[in-house]
Image (spheres, rainbow, N blue to C red):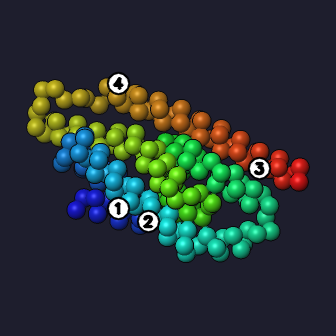
Amino acid sequence: MLCFVVCNFQILAIPAVPLTMSAGLLFGTLYGTIMVSIAGTLAATVAFLIARYFARDRILKLAQNNPKFLAIDKAIGADSFRVVTLLRLSPLLPFSLGNYLYGLTSVELIPYVLGSWLGMLPGTWAYVSAGAIGRAFIKQEADAVFPGGPESYWTLGIGLVATIFAASYVGKLAKNAMKDIEDA
């Protein structure tokens, strides 16, 4: 049931962070992360397919005379898995919006699904873990991991590095695509 609700929230672009944290509270870190990971990946795939099959052709018609858009689209599509994974690790692009935007690009489905799943795991784990901390407090477990521990620093650090790397990498792809246009 929680998977279904999380999936629908994300498809409808409703923030699912409270539900993600609730998964940790109700099911603990491991099972909560598994459930939210499945729901998030399913939601991302459904939104991607909605955009791909209902809007991609229209976007291509609008952009057919824009060589910059076409070059960037081609560059992103050529390196789909890496681009999607890095941008999923980064908070630069909101999750729900990203699902639809990727569907408008030439990103292929399988690299998109795998990159989304892998890139969402650290954030999913962090939010579910935060909920699991609440569970530990409620149960008064003596071995509870408290907020601000090393896990949270690792998660924040990975997110920051991924953001910098993703912005740099996608910028480089766009710059190379523009150079190819100018050289043509």
Residue 27 image point, x, y percent: 19, 46
In the rendering, at what x and y percent does residue 107 appear?
Answer: 59, 57
Which of the two discs, 4 and 3, sits closer to the camera?
A: 3
Residue corresponding to mark 2: 46
Of callouts 1 and 4, which one flags the residue occurring earlier in the amino acid sequence? 1
Label 1: element kind: helix
Q: Quadrant of residue 6?
A: bottom left
Q: CA distance from mark 1 to mark 4?
A: 30 Å
Q: Is residue 144 left or right of residue 66?
A: left
Q: Nearer the viewer, mark 1 or mark 2?
A: 2
Q: Quadrant of the N terminus?
A: bottom left
Return the mark for residue 177: 3
Q: Quadrant of the C terminus?
A: bottom right
Give the residue type that dot 1 points to.
Answer: Cys
The answer to whether residue 131 of the structure is visible from this angle is: no
Label 2 neighbourhood size at 10 Å, few (<14), some (14-19), many (20+)?
Answer: some
Q: Residue furthest front?
A: 110
Location of mark 4 (residue): 150
- Contact between marks 1 and 2 (CB within 8 A): the answer is yes
Q: What residue is disc 1 on?
A: 7
Residue 176 in view, yes or no: yes
